[in-house]
Amino acid sequence: MWADFLGVGLTRSGYNLLTRPFSDLATMGTQNSTVFDVGFFLVPGLLTVVIGLGLLDTRGMGRLWNAGAALVIGAGAFLFLTGVFRQDPSVPSAGVLHGTVSQICFALASIAPALLFIGSAGLRTSAPPRRVWLVVAVAALALELFGVLVRPALHIPYGLFQRPFTLALTVFFVTTSFWLLRDRRLRGLSVQD
């Protein structure tokens, strides 16, 4: 996602990497919009669903864990749909649909780390990155509340909200992916022993 953002953003004349929304790079009819859409929304959305399924497959977890995993799956599905329902300057309702779908993605993704942190307290297999999840949960929830309640009132550019929010979630998804891969490998070794 970040490589796609920087690659397309740096080549887009007049695009401000700090203040403009990510979605501006995927707007129908703009230069390299399809490349950005695939690399920023569609593929990462599918990968997020895979991470959620991996979390859901973790054995012996309770309701909060499963709810957190389901939210990750939902966030991935809505990230994918954000790429399906692109902004289109010729269709006014397209921007509203795109914004609504992306906000649902943000809301689900901001809650998931908190539920996984709380739900992982009794995990007996390889320890998940609980401290990272706690930090990301606090940051994501605070940033989401800021983005919904404070940012519009102060007229802060949307991009200034999106960058730290996406960075926090990137940390969550990368550490969670590595943990899932490590956990699967350890479970595979214990089955063979």
Image (cartoon, helix red, strand yellow):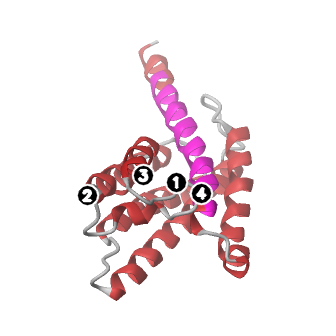
Query: Which of the labelled discs sits on residue 112, or is there none?
Result: 4
Tell me the amino acid under the disc marked 1: Leu
Circle 1 or circle 2, nearest the eye: 1
Span highlighted in magenta in the image = 160-185
In the figure, is residue 88 to the left or right of 16? left
* Residues at marks 4 and 3, CA–CA distance in whole angstroms: 29 Å
In the figure, is residue 55 to the left or right of 169? left
View extreme (bottom): residue = 92
Mark 3 surroundings within 10 Å by alpha-carbon count, few (fewer than 14), some (14 through 19), many (20 or more): many
* Residues at marks 3 and 2, CA–CA distance in whole angstroms: 13 Å
The image quadrant that residue 86 belongs to is: bottom left
* Residues at marks 1 and 2, CA–CA distance in whole angstroms: 18 Å
The secondary element bearing badge 3 is classed as: helix
Q: Earlier in the sequence, mark 4 or mark 3?
A: 3
Tell me the amino acid under the disc marked 3: Gly
Q: Which residue sits at x=59%, y=41%? A: 171
Mark 1 surroundings within 10 Å by alpha-carbon count, few (fewer than 14), some (14 through 19), many (20 or more): some
Asked if one can make out residue 148 in the rendered structure from this viewpoint, the answer is yes
Q: Cβ–Cβ below 8 Å for labels 1 and 3? A: yes
Q: Earlier in the sequence, mark 4 or mark 2?
A: 2
- Residue at label 2? 34
Q: Is residue 181 magenta?
A: yes
56 lies above or below 188: below
Q: Earlier in the sequence, mark 3 or mark 2?
A: 3
32 lies above or below 192: below
Query: Which of the labelled discs sits on residue 17, or is there none?
Result: 1
Q: Earlier in the sequence, mark 1 or mark 4?
A: 1
